[in-house]
Amino acid sequence: MTGQGKPATRVLLVDDNVDALQTLHVLLEMQGFEVQSFATPDEALAQASMFQPEVCVLDIGLPGMDGYELARRLQASGLRARYVALTGYGQASDRERSAAAGFHVHLTKPVQLDPLLDALKPLDA
């Protein structure tokens, strides 16, 4: 619960850079979010249906299954959430590709806190 008595927004983080993943996880928890983080797409897919995140923050450059495919699979599973691409790829073509894969927001690394917090509003907000 947040200080206002409403449940915290549930955020799913996926990034294969474990240091960045852990840092972002702690930062978001300090901001009042309920966070589950995973270093592999397979772990995220296995846990997402139980966690029911309202926002999915996905690295694009994941090994094995990239963030585009992960987003498509999460959406195909029926997970209705805001999808945020958090990536080192920032060209116009990268933004177009993330939009085509169902991402609502495309942020480039290193991300600033304010744009990230703005991106973490649930779809219903």
Image: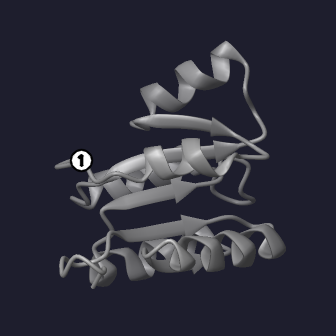
Nearer the observer, 106 or 111: 111
Say if 61 sits above or below 13 in the image: above
Residue 35 place in picture, x, y as percent = 47, 78
Q: Secondary structure at mark 1?
A: loop
Quick one: which residue is furthest to the top in this view? Answer: 92
Q: Is 79 left, or right, of 85 in this rendering?
A: left
Q: Is 27 left, or right, of 71 in this rendering?
A: right
Residue 77 place in picture, x, y as percent = 27, 61
Task: Report if residue 43 is visible in the image.
Answer: no
Nearer the observer, 19 or 68: 19
Name the image quarter holding residue 49. Answer: bottom left
Nearer the observer, 82 or 71: 82
Name the image quarter holding residue 100. Answer: top left
Q: Could you tell me the amino acid type at mark 1?
A: Leu
Residue 87 place in picture, x, y as percent = 70, 43
Residue where numbered disc 1 is placed: 123
Residue located at (73% from left, 49% from top): 61
Say if 56 sits above or below 82 in the image: below
Q: Is 88 left, or right, of 30 in this rendering?
A: right
The colour style of the image is one colour
Name the image quarter holding residue 92. Answer: top right
Task: Report if residue 51 is visible in the image.
Answer: yes
Nearer the observer, 64 or 47: 47
Q: Is 111 left, or right, of 49 in this rendering?
A: right
Residue located at (54% from left, 19% from top): 96
Tell me if mark 1 has few (under 14), some (14-19) or many (20+) residues whose alpha carbon lies within 10 angstroms of its own: few
Say if 21 sits above or below 72 in the image: below
Residue located at (30% from left, 79% from top): 2
- Placement of the N terminus among the 4 image quadrants: bottom left
